[in-house]
Amino acid sequence: MPKTRLVAFVLAFCLLAAGPVIASGAGAAKPSPAEVQAWLAEGNARFAAGKPENPHTDLERLGLSGKESQADYARATVLSCSDSRVPVERLFDVGVMDVFVIRVAGNVANTDEIGSIEYGLLHVNTPLLVVLGHSQCGAVTAVTQAALGHGHPLERNIPPLVAPIGPAVAKVMAENPGADEQVLVDKAITANVWQVMHDLFTASPAVREAVKSGKAAVAGALYDVGTGKVEWLDAARPAQILAAAEADPARAMNAMYEAPAEEMIAEKGEAKVEAVPLPAQEATPVVEPAPAKPAPSADLGQAMARLHDSLDAVAGVLAKGEAAKLEELSARFEGLQKDVEAKANATLASLAEREKMLEKRLSDATSGSSSAGWLAVILVLAAVVLLLGLTLPRIRKLEAKVKELSQQ
């Protein structure tokens, strides 16, 4: 081999050994945004053709991910929908530590997603952010149907989640009056990609600065769930949206997090502990003291009086033939009857206790004063028997009448 050809061969070998443009690893420089986009496009072409290589999915890569920093390897941040038909790593034919993925219904950009994008671009150091919409997006469809007036009920946390899609749908409807629903949905899916960029640039000064400085770029794309193909959208549009966000007086200005006063105090070692507010509770009801329980004999007398009133009321109803009130009064009657029986039993039990006490006193006493106690016991028992004797016949008579009416 001539000497000149040998030198050329060695130089070429050294250049190849230095690694391809897209190579990454510990200490390796990241490729440019354009190179990353081309790399993703090549992977998607393999996937859509049914010839994926499934790179970086072996055990060696897994072991590497347990020892190395993803910031030395990841090449793209991708914001996509959570839809199960949009498997980001597969559709770009990439593997472990290749892409920093953020998935959320409707690929919207709320605080959580924007914070994740900031981390992916500025801490994982990915050169490219891809906002990836997809065909047949359920979130965009739901918002479009609601705007057309025939949406369906949604759980409480879904409407605020997909609310950022609203401006994209409203814009499409204004630009396409009378268009078919499916046409509106398809156009809104694309408009939502641009709306996400607007929301991102408006809320994140850090992302705006990264894009302006050339540290990172933003690209829009649409994935077709039926073909597996990714369509890359207008490359000039992100710069236009960024310029509009820069001119928006409502844009966020401070790129860094500002700690509340309480957190700043804690950092200085002067943490102030405050009580955690508990959920509101209903006022504790005031419990009135229970009235003193009357003596058994008095309790029985009151119950007997109420029973007699009930009996009189039932008799009056029977006399008037008001069958509508009969059932109500019958129920009252049964309750009062049970109450009287219970009170009578309590009274008899009380009298039995008194009888025992009197027997003990009689055995101990020598005077005739204990005979007065016996006399009192006899009188009370006679009163109870008299009351029951007067009441029970009326009860049986009314029971028979109630049965007779119920059979009619």
Image (spheres, rainbow, N blue to C red):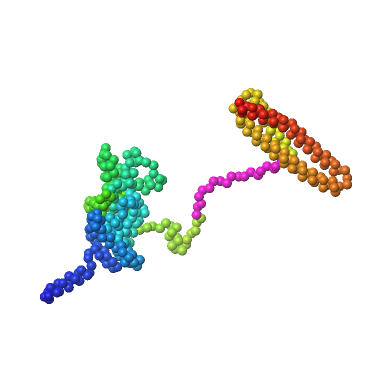
- From this view, report whether residue 181 is shown above or below residue 197: above
Span of residues in magenta: 276-295
- Across and down, in percent, residue 34 comes to 23, 58
Q: Say which quarter of the image contains residue 2.
A: bottom left
- Across and down, in percent, residue 173 comes to 28, 41
Task: Give the residue displayed 28% in from the left and 50% down from the top.
Answer: 225
Residue found at the very far top of the displayed protein: 320
Q: Say which quarter of the image contains residue 147.
A: top left
Task: Give the residue displayed 24% in from the left and 57% down from the top.
Answer: 51
Left or right relative to 20: residue 58: right
Dominant SS type (magenta): loop
Identify the image quadrant of the C terminus. Answer: top right
- Across and down, in percent, residue 268 comes to 44, 63
Task: Give the residue displayed 67% in from the left and 35% down from the top.
Answer: 336
Residue situated in front as seen by the camera: 407 or 93: 407
Residue situated in front as seen by the camera: 270 or 107: 107
Residue situated in front as seen by the camera: 43 or 200: 43
Left or right relative to 216: residue 387: right
Residue found at the very far front of the displayed protein: 407
